[in-house]
Structure formats: C-alpha cells, structure tokens
Image (spheres, grey):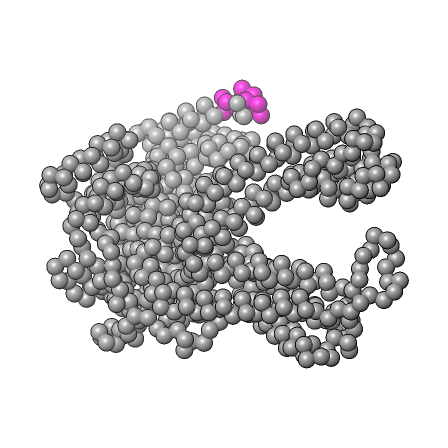
Amino acid sequence: LCLQKSNGTRATSHVNECHELVALCQTPDSKSPYEPLLYSRMEALGSHLNFNLQTHSLSHRTNGVPLFFAAKENSAGCIKKLLDSASTNIFERGALGETALHVAVMNDNMEAALALMDGAPELINEPMTSDLFLGMTPLHIAVVNQNFNLVRSLIGKGADVATPRVTGLYFRKRRGGLLYYGEHILAFAACVGNQDIISMVINAGASTRAQDSIGNTVLHILVLQPNKTIACLVLDLLLARDVELDQAVPLDMVPNYHGLTPFKLAAKEGNLVAFQHLVNRRRINQWNLGPLTSNLYDLTEIDSLVADDDCSVLELIVGSQRREARRILEVTPVRQLVSLKWNLYGKHYFRLLLLLYLLYIGTFTLCCVYRPLKDAPENYTVSDMDKTIRVQKTLKESYVTYGDNLRLAGEMISVLGALVILLLEIPDMLRVGAKHYFGQTALGGPFHVILIAYAFLVVLLCVFRVSGVQGETVVMAVCLVLGWSNVMFFARGFQMLGPYVIMIQKIIFGDLTKFMWLSFIVLIGFSTSLWMVYMTQDPDSLPAYRSFPITLFSQFELSVGLIDLPVDHTITTPPIVHVLHCTFSVVSYILLLNLLTAMMSDTQWRVAQERDELWRTQVVATTLMLERRLPRCLWPRLGVCGLLYGLGERWYLRVEDRNDPLVQKMRRYIQAFSKDEDQSKERDEMENTDMSKGPGSPLIRPKHRGGINGNRKSLARWQMIRHSALGLDVEQEEPEDDQEVR
C-alpha cells in the first residue's frame, strides 16, 4: 500500500520485475548472454526503489537493495554475482545501520552468510551504526539466535569475539528497558544460556572478566536476567572456566563501577535464587552426623562489621525499595546473623536508647511547663476578647532563683541534645540521600523528619530566649508535639508494637493524606458559601460564623462530629443555609467518611501481608544504625575466624541443621499447595528461549520441560501426597529445617 501510494502501479511492477530478475540469476546457467543486462537492470531498479523507500520500514528497505534482498532470500548464487559486479557497494547499510551480512545472519541464512563471508570478509566484524543497535556485529546476532553453525563459521572466518561492544540504546540498562544482555559477545551467549556457544566463544579468546560501560561483568549481567534457573547454571559454568585462569581475585568478587559484586547485586535486586545459589557455593560443610550437619557460611560480604566497605549485603537490603530484597532476610545465614545481632546486643542497646530519650524529652517537657512567666502589666490587652494574664519574662529576670538555675540546667541539656541529634542525623541523610532517607519506612521514614524538625526548633527556641523575642509559646508547643510523637519510633524495638506503627504510617501518609485533600476542597467550598450568607449578619448572633477563619474551622469541627449543627432557630435564618448544611452533611458524613473507612480497611489488608516483613527490615536497619553510632568495641564480631580451620582470614558463621524426615514430609504437604507461580513463569520463559539450532541439546535447562496446566499441577501434587503417605520413594527436595547457630 505504501508503494502504491507513493509511486502507483509502476512501483509495484518494479518490485515484481526485481523479483523475476533475482529468480533468473538463480538459474544454473551462469553463462547466460543476458547476464550483464540483468545486472544493470537490477541495479537500476535497486537504485530506484532505494530512493523511493528510504522512509519506509526495514523490510521494505531490505527488499529495495538487491544485495540485501538476496541475503534475506538466502540466494548464494545471486550474492556471488552481485559481489562480482563493480557497481555493488558491499558496505551499503539499511535503515538500522545493518549490512547484508547482518541481514543474512538475522534470518539464519547459512548459505547467504557463507557467500558474503567468502566474497566480502570485510563485513565479518562490521558493526551496525544506528543509535538503537550501535556496535552489534553479525556474531552478536548469531549468538542471540543460538545458531551454532553460524557462530562456528563466523569465528572460523576471523570474527573478533573480544573487542566488539554493543552500546546501542536498545541494549543499554535503563528504566523500562526490555533487554539487557551487556555489551560483549560472551555476555550475549551467557544470557541465552547455550553451553556449546559459551564454550566456543571462550575458547576463541573471549575474556570472562570483560566489563561493560557501567562495570558489570558477565556474572552481574546474569544476576539481572529474568530466567533465574538458567542464569545459575551458566554462572557455574563461567566460574569453572574462570578458575582455570588462576586469577588472584575470583570472578564473583569483582565489583562493578558502583562497588557491587554479583553477590551484592543479587541482594540489591532481590534475586533470591541467585543469592541463595552463590551462598551455597561459598558454603563449607564441616561435618555430618546422621541427620545433623554443620556448615560454615562466609560472612565477608554479608556482615556490615566484616565487609571492607560500607556496602554490605545488609545495608543493600535495607536500602532497597524492592519487596523481593526483603525476602533475602529469611535466607541462611542472613536470618541467623540478624537474629544473633539483635538478640545479643542490638535489642538491649536500642531499649537503653529509648530510656535515655524518655529522660531527655521528659526534661524538655518540664522546662516548658515551668518556663519563666510574670504577671501581665496593666492595659496589656487591646481587646476585650484577649484574656492574657501572664507574659514571658526577660532574659535577666528568667534566671534568678534556685528553681530557675535547675531549669537552666534542663534547658542546657535540651539544647545540647538537639545539637547531638542534628550531628547524628544530617550525615546519615547526606550518605543515603534525602529522598530515600525520608521516604523509606525501613529507614525510619517520617520519624527522621520529625526528629530533625524537633531539634531545629529547639535550637531556634534557644535563640528566641537569648534574644528576648516574644514568640516562644508557639515554638514550644510544636516542639512538644514533635518530641513526644517521635517516641513511636522506638516501637520498632518491640515485636508487639512495631508492625502496628508501620500500619499507622501507611494509613497516615496514604489514605489520610488523600482524604484530607478531598476534605479541604469540600470545606473551602461550603465554608465560603456559608460566609457569603453570614457576613451580612451580626457577629455576636452566631459566634461560630463571626469571621471566615472561624467559619472554616467550625465546618471542620462539624465534618468530624466534634460540635453540633451551629444554627440558631430563634433568629431568622435564610433557607439557603439549611440547603447548604444538608448537602454538606451528605457529602462529609455519608460520602467522605465512609470512603475513608473503606480506604483504611483496604490498606490494612494490604499492609498486613507484609507488615511483619517490614518490621524485620526495620530491625535490621536499627541494628545497622546502632553499629554506625556506637563504638566498635561494643559490637564484638560474631562467628569464627577462618584461621582456626585453615580457611584464611575470613569470618564464618557456623550453622547446624537437622534433617528430620517427619519435618520434610510435613513440608511436602505444605509445598504441594503453596508453590509460588514463579516456577511456572520460569518454565514458560525457558520454553520461549528454547531454540533448535546447533548439535545436541546445547541449551542449559532443568531436566523437566514443557508447560503444565492447572489440572495437571493438582494431579501432580496429590500424587506427591499419596507417595508420601504410602512411604514410597519420591524426589528428594532440599530441606529447610530448624537450625541452631553456634
């Protein structure tokens, strides 16, 4: 249709003629006397079509260039004749910056690719030049298509496996990106999971330690892949090949430019499968005795006290906004390490901190209650409605008696405490970033805002007192509210209260915020309409509506049910007032309040699914906060030194497992009906990535293949239960039993 709209029937006839000429070129008779005429006509048609199709899609562009069309149709004879023609430009590119060899490889045309490699070897390492696919060579495409024969032929013809890098926009790691295979050819091969191609590329000279533009090695890239099972199998293969190089630093310990090793990146991204796999690779079996086993787990990158930098696994989990990352806290040995830290030291230090804060805020409260006041002078008030009888003393009058000196000591403690709070909070805020520091529930969220605001206002209160400014009453009132509200922060140290404080936070900053915006709009509208009526009335006749601010506040009180309807029926009331009050009652009481109740119920149900998980994350964040702020001598290292077992200077946590057959049987019952859908998703992903190219079965995948519908899943689970009940042999699963830590 595009051709007909641009050039009418003539363009379509040119295309048909071009196809017929290509067919003539494919005849066995290569000595045809019409051969020169055929090629000259094809070149003319190709130029004509190329001129008219430059704004169309890639498929039209490919059909418009004879060499591209021959590569797409796998016409080796036509390609050879075109390459022999002096007018053929072998470096001609398509709409995406591709050459004819790219087209042949992309369509898995082996004969056309071989003809191009033999006739134009310069194209073998020629990259694509468009912004989307910049740097992609034919070998990249053959690897992604898992065409083993093409990969072998390209490498045999001299394709470079180490230098080419894909830096096009389509393959970059970005928000919303659909594909991230890295930049190097080995990374592409690892992501598709073809064992034979991976081995071939490594044998041809590809480096297993090559890093892309953000420093990610092939292991980092595997951690970010959605097909976690194949990624772990390829990871084992690459680590085994890297061991042969005898490098000083293992491949899984090489960091990217952000300081993250593959192990840490798995924790940050919440890749539970890859994290557990890497943990198990570093696990050392100490001994086995019947159902008991003792394992040593490396704490080098997990424990914040052992890690060489501030970027430990625990820090990354706490700082991550992914729910999947928080699930890593249940993985051995992370769960045992966190439990030991909290129960042995963190819990006691945190509750001691709570006691100190209560003493501090109590002292500040007493200083506010007994602040220096004196009787107001005569004629101090200018209005009959002002009932002030006491005012603030001057600085000289404030510190005279013994009681004033005691209050002065409390005020000094309050100001020094506020300065300490600012000195502790501001560096943490700068280290994490204000957005994450104030926005994440695990890190404290709004309580950090409350605490910093309280400390700043206390310092401001000190400035007011010294300068004699008459306005400390308002500041004191706000400080008291903020200071006592911050006591809820310490509820995270108690399992009974911590999860409920999380729920309160979610409701206040979620549902209640939305409700207040809606209520504010309704209040402004109805308060203004009522004020239009009462602004013509005597202010003393109805005090609730004597001014616009008072009217607005009265309507707010009425909306939450704090006062009765402020209408005096002993005086004449315009009918519009009754209409407005009835409408406001319907909108405020029936609509908005019921909407708030429904929203809070929904939030309570959603938060209940993960409140315990969030509370455990808060416990970890609290422990790490105490580790940073308390002297290191108060935090002895947990675990054992590897020197005791001949394992170097690394620290290990010893975990003892009990493999109880009865527990395994019960867990088999539970897992039969509570398996996550992630397994089926991964199975579908492996089916989608399954290719039938190359010898044997090069694709790394689990033993079982094929999709299973819901009925077959249920039958399989019931079959598992029947086998378990009858005592028959079933496939053993790795147990996760109760564990003891030493």
Residue 616 is situated, as x and y percent measured from the top left of the image, at 40, 56
Q: Is residue 9 magenta?
A: yes
Whether residue 40 can be seen here = no
Q: Nearer the viewer, residue 132 or 105?
A: 132
Height in image: 709 above or below 689?
above
Residue 7 is situated, as x and y percent measured from the top left of the image, at 57, 24
Question: In this rendering, would 428 be left or right of 732?
Answer: right
Whether residue 226 can be seen here = yes
Residue plotted at (64% across, 43% down): 516
Residue 447's quadrant in the figure?
Answer: bottom right
Height in image: 12 above or below 707?
above
The C terminus, quarter of image: bottom left
Residue 376's quadrant in the figure?
Answer: bottom right
Q: Which residue is most to the front?
A: 570
Question: In this rendering, would 455 be left or right of 725?
Answer: right
Residue 205 is situated, as x and y percent measured from the top left of the image, at 31, 59
Q: Nearer the viewer, residue 736 or 298?
A: 736
Where are the magenta residues, as a range? 4-14
Residue plotted at (78% across, 27% down): 576
Residue 175 is situated, as x and y percent measured from the top left of the image, at 50, 48
Residue plotted at (23% across, 46% down): 667
Q: Is residue 443 magenta?
A: no
* Main secondary structure of the magenta stretch: helix
Height in image: 306 above or below 504?
below
Question: In this rendering, would 346 be left or right of 646?
Answer: right
How many numbered marks does the figure carry? 0
Residue plotted at (25% across, 62% down): 740
